[in-house]
Amino acid sequence: MALRKIVTEGDDVLLKKCRPVEKFDKKLWDLLDDMAETLYDSGGVGLAGPQVGIMRRVCVIDIGDGLVEYINPQIISSEGSHEVVEGCLSSPGEFGLVNRPVKVVAKAFDRDGKEFTVEGEDLFAQAMCHEFDHLDGVLFKSKAIRMLSPEELEHDED
Ligand code: NI
């Protein structure tokens, strides 16, 4: 396993659509291992392929109750909507208010190429939406209702 460098905003790879994963091979497993290590090192909750310069539809999420690896993910259905505070490892120190579904059901493939379905609420649903957006070259800032000021962030940390 190795840490990968996280691409930050300003790099065009973050604005491009990723291609589907076709081979569930050692190269993919190494990538997933590296992405998990990089995610835990960063302290974030999710990391997508383009954020480590890989233009494939792959991401990892851990909101604190275990890692989930998503390959070629798709949202099947979503419910509700709420305003949530959101940030991104590719936009360090910046947070904004975004409208996200309260609940989503998604399907994806695991590292062995087996399809699974996952249901998530609140932060988990938000993280899936955020990471899957990355695979289409969409950053949360382009969806933000507004960004939070440094004063508001200080207040949030109280
Ligand atoms: Ni992000």
Image (cartoon, rainbow, N blue to C red):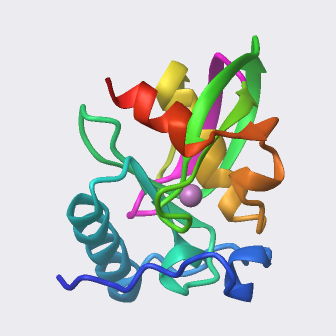
Asked if the magenta segment contains residue 102, the reply would be yes
40 or 115: nearer the eye? Answer: 40
Q: Residue furthest left?
A: 1
Residue in the picture at 64% in, 83% down = 55
Q: Position of residue 150 (x, y in %)?
A: 53, 44
Q: Is residue 120 left or right of residue 17?
A: left
The image quadrant that residue 156 belongs to is: top left
68 or 61: nearer the eye? Answer: 61
Compared with 86, 139 (above or below) is below
Total count of labels: 0
Segment colored magenta: 101-113
Q: Residue furthest top?
A: 80
Q: Give the image quadrant in which the ligand numbered 1 is located.
A: bottom right
Q: Position of residue 101 (x, y in %)?
A: 71, 22
Residue in the picture at 74% in, 87% down = 12
Q: Residue furthest front?
A: 151
Residue 15 visible (yes or no):
yes
Q: Is residue 78 left or right of residue 113?
A: right
Compared with 2, 90 (above or below) is above
The image quadrant that residue 24 belongs to is: bottom left
Q: Position of residue 133 (x, y in %)?
A: 71, 54
19 or 93: nearer the eye? Answer: 93
Residue in the picture at 72% in, 38% down = 75
Residue in the picture at 62% in, 42% down = 149
The image quadrant that residue 41 belongs to is: bottom left
Compared with 86, 11 (above or below) is below
Residue 127 visible (yes or no):
no
- Which quadrant holds the N terminus? bottom left
Asked if the magenta segment contains residue 69, the reply would be no
117 or 114: nearer the eye? Answer: 117
Q: Position of residue 35 (x, y in %)?
A: 34, 71
